Amino acid sequence: MIRPFNRARNVGIDLGTANTLIYIAGKGTVLSEPSVVAIDLNTGKLVEAGQEAHRMLGRTPGDIRTVRPLRDGVIADFDAAELMIKSFIEKGNEGRRLMAPRLVVGIPSGVTGVERRALRDAALVGAREVYLIDEPMAAAIGAGLPVTEPVGTMIVDIGGGTTEVAVISLCGVVTCESLRVAGDEFDDAIRRYMKKVHGLLIGERTAEEAKVCLASAFPGDENEALTLEIRGLHLASALPRTVTISSVEIREALGESLAMIVDLIKRTLERTPPELASDIAQRGIMLAGGGARLKGISDLVAHETGIPAHLAENPLECVVLGCARVLEDYGRLSRVLDTQISG
Ligand code: ADP
Ligand code: MG
């Protein structure tokens, strides 16, 4: 049977270091789950993927291993990445296999050529076509930036494992810088601070909660003057204890990480050709990714660079929405893709 071309389902995938999102044309964003899989070491088979696997992190028996395949913005475990993609597509399609989908997969810009090729081959099994796109480009499209026009725009994507900064013009990435400091490192910095200043050991989840509820990156933002009770293990007494901390303390804890992100933005601006840099100075800097939801971060970036900074409307979904837009508007946007491999 010859299947008409337009019957193929368009699918966008954001393969993030922290979260993977799937968009199916006609259905919208159907899945958003942590980029984690649990694998049975004896059989090599997938035990759980996403939320369920995330709950198993640090709690598995000896023969099950939990893996975050893209943790640092490179593919740390290939087989795990492949299992994760397949499991998520199926889950996003209500447990049924999608027939010959057309995939656009957003990947961190640090993924190498060899890894790209292997990933494409892996994703290709069962797909009609697979295209890869650099995540900053996808994020820019998803955030509504005019990437096809001859104007410079800057996107800053603060994810879990990496922050990526890119300057885009005429469908191309002009300059791009990446740093392994993002949301996960914010959590770690809060944990280190609590240990050093309050002698309190706290878990990853507690640190993340403190960040989301309390962090304030810039004086006078919404979270200024909030406090929160944090539970942890008091080191000196080896007993659980609750400590009240303020948003100002969290700002202090995050100071160094935030300064590194600001420096990365400044460095990228310095490397940007003058015409494009002046476009950016006029139009502003666009912030995307879950880490950019940290309160006050756009004020901080604007203050430090002297350039207006805006948070994208839907920071967590920018990449997957950008992938979907490329498929919908293929004629105009295909130039932003890596070269295609057909199935
Ligand atoms: P990736 O693209 O690397 O998978 P995401 O864009 O999904 O990452 O962002 C995940 C990060 O965003 C996590 O570190 C998470 O803690 C952080 N995050 C999500 N919501 C908020 C929030 N409201 N405030 C601060 N950080 C947040
Ligand atoms: Mg991302």
Image: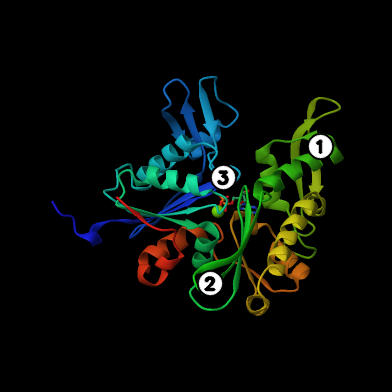
Mark 1 = which residue?
195
- Farthest residue in the front direction? 114
Q: Nearer the viewer, residue 213 or 7?
A: 7
Q: Mark 3: which amino acid?
A: Val
Mark 3 = which residue?
74
Q: Nearer the viewer, residue 213 or 177?
A: 177
Is residue 74 rendered to the left or right of residue 96? right
Q: Mark 2: which amino acid?
A: Leu
Residue 56 image position (x, y, % from top left):
54, 31
Q: Residue at x 33, y 43 (%)?
A: 125
Q: CA distance from mark 1 to mark 2?
A: 42 Å
Residue 40 image position (x, y, % from top left):
46, 25
**Taking the image as drawn, is residue 49 in sight?**
no
Q: Residue at x 29, y 43 (%)?
A: 96
Q: Nearer the viewer, mark 1 or mark 3?
A: 3
Q: Is residue 206 above or below residue 44?
A: below
Q: Residue at x 50, y 49 (%)?
A: 113
Instruction: Determine which quarter of the picture holds residue 4.
Output: bottom left
Element under label 1? helix
Is residue 335 rendered to the left or right of residue 71? left
Sort mark 3 into few (<14), some (14-19) or many (20+) by Cα contacts within 10 Å: some
Element under label 2? loop
Q: Residue at x 75, y 44 (%)?
A: 190
Mark 2 = which residue?
145
Q: Is residue 322 above or below residue 107?
A: below
- Farthest residue in the left direction? 1
Residue 178 image position (x, y, % from top left):
64, 55
Q: Mark 1: which amino acid?
A: Lys
The tag earlier along the polypeptide, 3 or 2, is 3
